[in-house]
Image (tube, rainbow, N blue to C red):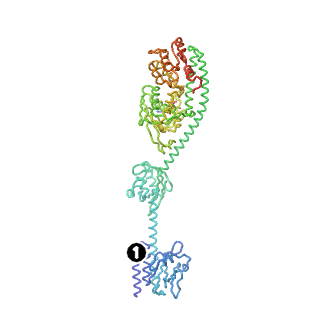
Amino acid sequence: MSEHASKILKIQNDLSCRLGRTSSLTEALQLCVEAGMEAAGMELGGIYLVNREGGIDMLCHKGLPEEFVRAVSHFDKDAPRMKILMQGNPIFFSANNNPLPESVNASGAEYYKALAVIPFKHNGEVIGCMNIGTAASEEISGIAAQALETIGNQIGDILARVRAQEQLRESEEKFSAICRSAQNAVIMMDARGRVSFWNNAAETMFGYSETEAAGRDLHDLIASGEQRQAFRRAFSSFRETGRGSFTGKTVELAAVRKNGEEFPAELTLTQIRLKGEWNASGIVRDISQRKREEAEKQNLQQQLQQAQKMEAIGTLAGGIAHDFNNIIAAINGTAEMMLKSKHPESPDFVRLERIIKSGLRARDLSMKLLTFARKEKLQARTVALDAVIADLTDMLRGTISRGIAIRTRATEPGLHIHADTNQILQALLNICLNACEAMPEGGAVVIETGRAAVGSGEALEACARPGAYCVVSIKDSGHGMDETALRKIFDPFFTTKEPGKGTGLGLSVTHGIVHEHNGFISVQSAPGQGTAFRVFLPEAAPCEEPDADPQRAAARGFGKGAILVIDDDTDFNGMIAEALESEGYDVIATHSGPQALEAFKTNMEIIDAVILDMILPDMDGTAIFRALKELRPDATVILCSGHSQKGKAAALLEQGAAAYIQKPFLLSEIFEAVQRVVHPSGTDE
Ligand SMILES: Nc1ncnc2c1ncn2[C@@H]1O[C@H](COP(=O)(O)OP(=O)(O)OP(=O)(O)O)[C@@H](O)[C@H]1O
Ligand SMILES: [Mg+2]
């Protein structure tokens, strides 16, 4: 073997050994170009690979200056001589034979004087070329050309393999980067149902690290207890057939995190055949947020429907109640007039009284309807919540039966609300009365007040504004309610009471009033577990102006009128006070002469009239009358007595008493007398 031949053989051997050890395409190309240069004994070289468009790109070079490389780094598939090259034919350029095109020595610096372009192939197709040349000689010798062709034949397959490996590695890296950074959990399980891939989102979603998850049964890991068996069954049929009820579809499931928390998820399962066995890859999406939003939307829709229903019933009820009121007024007025002409002993007297009583009940009912229909305007002012609760408990104690205790607790005293006191009292009273009615065996109603910050989520749910609220919570230990009842309690006319016992309007009125005050109500109850209502009312800043409190304003005589009642009979006092208050008067009830005079002295400025019983055990009516007149000569006094006191009364009437009423009297009579003396002009104001 010639020396040259053995040199070429050695170069070939070395090259093949080195290429076998490398997996980097850049390094492999470098080894090839160096081997070519050594074999040809030339100092310049480069390697081009064919690109997707059929042109060639220079990927490696040696001995060539950068500006030259830039000029020749790429040739299109239509460039001169590309066709020859792509057919697998080497091209030799030299000074005498086939001179180099000008474009090769672009800058005119003439880097190459002679150049061999040697194509190399894989599977019969040209995949690139090796360019080896020199500036030292104008010819490529036959030996050099042969050596280069030998190397060219050697490297095609090897470079193709290295390039394929590198492309595979790159694509794997890309795939892995995509899977790892995906927002959804990407999971793969092998034919036995064990986790073989677990991306970062799966780690976050389920709480298991990749190492913890790898090799474990996927169903144990992510399916909730109830669904685990169903999944296992589906998977074993999938393993046998490669098909399953879940494959190729997106299904919803209850998934479970490492900490045991269940959450709704969406799973898309795909089958993959690896090494002849079915594997499954799954993409899992946490849909808790979407579910929450759907539930919220549904809740809002229900609320809207409820609001529309209430609105419609309200309009209807309001319309009826308005006419109904006029009808009742006519019936009652006529009955009252007829009653005046009847003797109390006459059977018609009792009948007419019955008509009036029924009429009053009808009036109450229509008042409730009107309140529910919210046809009444709010007289809202800033009021102390504690005062409202004090009034509420007073009213309750006067109303409820024995055996029920009322307990109050202010967790945060000094809160204020902007409210129509009467209406809010009515709203709270309705809840309290229900609470009492739910405890026929007795028990306790616990009324607590406090403050709550209502966040935007809670507010949206309650269709209210977020912000600071005062909360009145009313709890009972009564029979409670089931879910069906709970859903209906605010519906007008929903009642579980016996026919004729309840109107079912109590809570709808409460609901209307609270909403009118921009508040909302939450209820918790279960059968046998009692009930807790929480009424949320927007918190108001305390008002500086003392007269802003309607109670106080009324007490100063700015209401319909303030009346001092003096009578030793407590029942009578209570009845009169209630009747007058129901007519819009403020009443100070006293039981003895000295107490009455004391009260008169304190409230002299605001008292519009005094109703004085002529006989009191501790002081004679005449004496009280004189004392009152002494304190205030223009005091308006209505005398009243059960005995025939015409003589005494006549004397006092002469001395300036405003009116005399004989007991027993009709309430209408006392109303008429009070109205006449307090508002002589006949108006209310
Ligand atoms: N605290 C409670 N415990 C148990 N059930 C209650 C409670 N509050 C309300 N309910 C239920 O809600 C229904 C409706 O109450 P609502 O106050 O609207 O009407 P009512 O009490 O039946 O009639 P009315 O208020 O006219 O007397 C009641 O019949 C009862 O079934
Ligand atoms: Mg009720």
Q: Quadrant of the N terminus?
A: bottom left
Q: Position of residue 199 (x, y in %)?
A: 43, 58
Task: Examine the rendered structure and indicate whether residue 223 appears above or below residue 346.
Answer: below
Residue 405: image quadrant is top left
Q: Position of residue 482 (x, y in %)?
A: 47, 36
Residue 412: image quadrant is top left
Q: Quadrant of the C terminus?
A: top right
The residue to which callout 1 is attached is 20
Which residue occupies the foreground of this view, 545 or 462? 545
Direction from residue 374 to residue 211 in the image, left or right: left
User: Residue at position x 44%, y 20% from top?
Assistant: 595
User: Residue at position x 46%, y 74% from top?
Assistant: 160
Task: Examine the rendered structure and indicate whether residue 297 appears above or below residue 71.
Answer: above
Residue at the left extreme, as displayed: 212
Task: Examine the rendered structure and indicate whether residue 656 appears above or below residue 78.
Answer: above
Direction from residue 210 to residue 576 in the image, left or right: right
Number of numbered discs: 1
Q: Is mark 1 within 8 Å of ligand 1?
A: no
**Do we see residue 259 in this rendering?**
yes
**Residue type at mark 1?**
Gly
- Residues packed near mark 1 inside 10 Å, few (<14), some (14 to 19) or many (20 plus): few
Which residue occupies the foreground of this view, 228 or 492? 492
**Do we see residue 123 in this rendering?**
no
Q: Position of residue 130 (x, y in %)?
A: 47, 79
Q: Secondary structure at mark 1?
A: helix
Q: Position of residue 211 (x, y in %)?
A: 38, 58
Which residue occupies the foreground of this view, 570 or 530? 570
Task: Examine the rendered structure and indicate whether residue 70 appears above or below residue 168.
Answer: below
